Image (cartoon, rainbow, N blue to C red):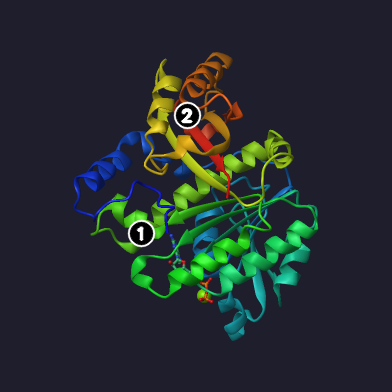
């Protein structure tokens, strides 16, 4: 396991972890805009989110009011099959409105979710059976239909023991059918937030990161970047994200500099990227000057051979804050 979100450490009490802890709590890494009403509009039906298994149900509940209403969100878990009252059902959330429909198998779900889809985003927790197995089947079905798939998975905590080797196998299997795979190591939540953190709090932070990633990838899709990148990227790329926010007339420079230090990016991320996409997002539409400034700073940091694109996007929930988000795609 070498894909830790943060630099390897010797334990939660080491100096490094303490500094990481301080970093994550610095205001520039807060994603408080997610708690403001009014998710932006997306392209109706084209991006579809499917949340699978126990972890998927938790994700769906968090995501539903935070991603565009126009993005269908499906949640399906075994519980729905096992509970007599909910026999063979699946929930579809649309901006907070839940519709329950019949779903007997992953083929049923695919028939509904993939209809008209041009990008499939799947969330689940690695280490279990239901989420990981169905994510793999769904990704295969989407790939057969030429639909790019991005997965957002978690790696189980070390204390979950036997779940880890299973998680590793499931993660590898996904590589063949996916455009990109984002992985959050649950252990890193404890390292970042401290050993005393409640599981519910740790999960909350991870749900925020997942929401921010999903919003960013949805924006990149709307900018046609997913289709462009598909032409030259290997399948199953690793997707890393770093982000930060800032205010004021220096907000672009400050947010970019802080994003480079984001604890979600491994320390060596600049050595291997295949492609880097940068989003500047704000309630006050980023100016061309800000976009150019960030692009120039990124060019100085990255090797000239790495393709790099910088875009400006509006999300009114952010007000005057400018978020700079780096999406780093690496060879699998
Ligand atoms: N970060 C985070 N991890 C979670 C959450 N819920 C579950 N997990 C992790 O995801 C792993 C898989 O758990 P589930 O999603 O419940 O498993 P499942 O897909 O329902 O699979 P089964 O084993 O068939 O029940 C767990 O071992 C945890 O590590 C969550 O809300 N947030
Ligand atoms: Mg389960």
Q: Element type at marker 1?
A: helix
Q: Residue 157 carries which label?
A: none
Residue 266 visible from this viewpoint: yes
User: Neighbour class for label 2 at 10 Å: few (<14), some, many (≥20)?
Assistant: some
Give the residue at x 48% y 30%: 324
User: Neighbour class for label 1 at 10 Å: few (<14), some, many (≥20)?
Assistant: some
Q: Which residue carries the number 2 mark? A: 319
From the top left corner, tell me how far across and down residue 29 is, in percent.
38, 38
Q: In screen coordinates, is 325 left or right of 197?
A: right
C-alpha distance separating marks 2 and 1: 33 Å
Residue 132 found in image quarter:
bottom right
In the rendered image, the vertical position of residue 54 relative to residue 247, given as above or below: below
Q: Element type at marker 2?
A: loop
From the top left corner, tell me how far across and down residue 308 is, in percent.
59, 28
Instruction: Judge by depth and name the residue closer to the eye, 267 or 246.
Output: 267
Q: Which residue carries the number 1 mark? A: 187
Of badges 2 and 1, nearer the viewer stands 1
In the rendered image, the vertical position of residue 247 relative to residue 147, given as above or below: above
From the top left corner, tell me how far across and down residue 266 is, in percent.
41, 43
Residue 126 visible from this viewpoint: no
In the rendered image, the vertical position of residue 8 relative to residue 53, given as above or below: above
Give the residue at x 56% y 54%: 64
Asked whether the residues under the numbered discs 2 and 1 touch, taking CB atoms below 8 Å apart as contact, a structural biologist would say no
Residue 56 found in image quarter:
bottom right
Sequence-wise, the earlier of marks 2 and 1 is 1
Q: In screen coordinates, is 2 left or right of 294?
A: left
């Amino acid at each position: 396991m070498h894909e830790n979100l943060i630099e390897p450490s010797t334990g939660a009490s080491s100096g490094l972890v303490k500094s990481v802890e301080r970093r994550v709590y610095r205001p520039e890494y807060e994603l408080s805009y997610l708690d403001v009403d009014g998710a932006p509009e997306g392209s109706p039906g084209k991006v579809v989110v499917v949340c699978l298994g126990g972890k998927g149900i938790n994700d769906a509940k968090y995501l539903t009011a935070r991603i565009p209403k126009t993005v269908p969100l499906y949640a399906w878990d075994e519980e729905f099959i096992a509970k007599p009252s909910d026999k063979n059902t699946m929930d579809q959330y649309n901006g907070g409105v839940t519709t329950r429909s019949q779903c007997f198998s992953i083929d049923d779900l695919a028939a509904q979710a993939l209809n008209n889809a041009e990008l499939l985003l799947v969330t689940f927790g690695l280490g279990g059976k239901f989420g990981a197995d169905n994510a793999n089947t769904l990704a295969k079905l989407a790939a057969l239909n030429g639909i790019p798939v991005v997965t957002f998975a978690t790696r189980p905590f070390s204390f979950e023991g036997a779940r880890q080797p299973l998680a590793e196998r499931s993660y590898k299997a996904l590589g063949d059918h996916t455009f990109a795979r984002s992985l959050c190591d649950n252990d890193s939540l404890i390292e970042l937030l401290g050993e005393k953190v409640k599981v519910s709090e740790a999960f909350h932070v991870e749900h925020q990161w997942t929401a921010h990633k999903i919003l960013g990838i949805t924006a990149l899709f709307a900018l046609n970047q997913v289709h462009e990148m598909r032409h030259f990227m290997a399948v199953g790329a690793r997707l890393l994200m770093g982000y930060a926010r800032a205010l004021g007339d220096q907000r672009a420079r400050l947010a970019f500099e802080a994003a480079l230090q984001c604890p979600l990016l491994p320390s060596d991320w600049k050595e291997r990227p295949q492609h880097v996409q940068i989003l500047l997002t704000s309630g006050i539409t980023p100016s061309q000057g800000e976009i150019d400034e960030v692009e120039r700073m990124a060019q100085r940091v990255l090797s000239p051979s790495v393709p790099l694109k910088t875009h400006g996007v509006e999300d009114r929930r952010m007000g005057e804050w400018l978020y700079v988000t780096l999406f780093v795609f690496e060879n699998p």
